[in-house]
Image (cartoon, rainbow, N blue to C red):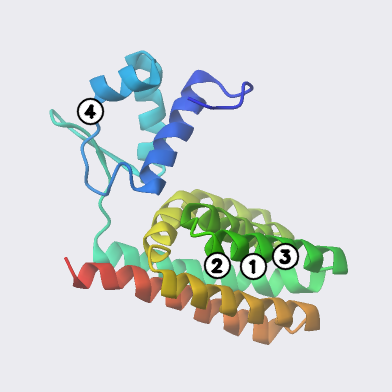
């Protein structure tokens, strides 16, 4: 595992399992083969199960008695509820963040968006998703509301799984870039109402893209 040296073994296992889930290598509903994964990661069962316990608390892993560990499957209703909550929280974050945005912050958002566009043009959807995540997390941090930041952080992994599903569509990803460009323009104008409206529309677009997957199943 290519992990930073400062992480504990349990944290390294955690990060690798998260990567496999978010990338789709471990798809929704899939069982986790404990023997195969511990051998692949070259770790023992104890830290492996500790990492899965953390992921279970965060809602990405299900522990089924006598059956083992499974990647959590989200129902259509659970997914819809998650995105309705996300819209409320992130729009609130925008309202709080915009008044705190300096020109330096705007430049930071531009760099993030430039990197996202570059990843999209290179066909690297996984990198695009990471820049998208950074964009939203930066807004959250600028809100200055500790309770809001903590709540969004707890939902981050579930949101990231949804983001990965939506970003599988290149058309959606290109549309999302245009939406965020509009949001950036609202940031420059310090137009809170417009920025909030655009964020709500952007997340609603992601929500539709994710929920469309349920229609085909």
Asked whether disc 2 touches disc 1, contact meaning CB atoms under 8 Å apart, the reply is yes
- Nearer-N-terminus badge (2/4): 4
Residue at 32 percent of width and 16 percent of height: 45
Residue at 53 percent of width and 63 percent of height: 120
Residue identifier under label 3: 109
Residue identifier under label 4: 33
- Nearer-N-terminus badge (1/4): 4
- Nearer-N-terminus badge (1/3): 1
Q: Position of residue 176 (x, y in %)?
A: 52, 74
Q: Nearer the viewer, mark 1 or mark 3?
A: 3
- Nearer-N-terminus badge (3/2): 2
Residue identifier under label 2: 89
| Label 2 – label 1 distance at C-alpha | 6 Å
Compared with residue 210, is residue 137 higher up or lower down, i.e. above or below?
Answer: above
Q: Nearer the viewer, mark 1 or mark 4?
A: 4
**Label 4: how many residues lie within 10 Å, few (<14), some (14-19) or many (20+)?**
few
Q: Nearer the viewer, mark 3 or mark 2?
A: 3
- Nearer-the-camera pick, 159 or 178: 178
Residue identifier under label 1: 93
Q: Extreme top residue here?
A: 44
Is 63 on the left-hand or right-hand side of 191?
Answer: left
Residue at 28 percent of width and 73 percent of height: 212
| Label 1 – label 4 distance at C-alpha | 39 Å
């Amino acid at each position: 595992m290519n992990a930073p040296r400062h992480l504990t073994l349990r944290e390294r296992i955690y990060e690798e399992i998260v990567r496999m889930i978010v990338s789709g290598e471990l798809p929704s509903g899939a069982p986790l083969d404990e023997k195969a994964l511990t051998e692949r990661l070259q770790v023992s069962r104890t830290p492996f199960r500790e990492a899965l316990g953390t992921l279970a608390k965060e809602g990405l892993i299900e522990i089924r008695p006598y059956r083992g560990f499974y990647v959590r499957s989200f129902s259509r209703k659970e997914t819809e509820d998650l995105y309705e909550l996300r819209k409320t929280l992130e729009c609130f974050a925008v309202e709080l963040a915009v008044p705190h945005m300096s020109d330096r912050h705007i430049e930071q958002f531009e760099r993030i968006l430039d990197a996202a566009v570059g990843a999209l043009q290179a066909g690297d959807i996984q990198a695009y998703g990471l820049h998208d995540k950074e964009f939203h997390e930066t807004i959250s941090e600028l809100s200055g509301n500790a309770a809001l930041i903590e709540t969004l952080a707890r939902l981050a992994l579930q949101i990231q799984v949804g983001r990965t599903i939506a970003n599988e569509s290149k058309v959606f990803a290109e549309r999302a870039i245009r939406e965020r460009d509009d949001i950036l323009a609202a940031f420059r104008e310090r137009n809170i109402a417009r920025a909030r409206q655009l964020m709500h529309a952007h997340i609603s677009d992601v929500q539709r893209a994710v929920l469309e997957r349920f229609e085909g199943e």
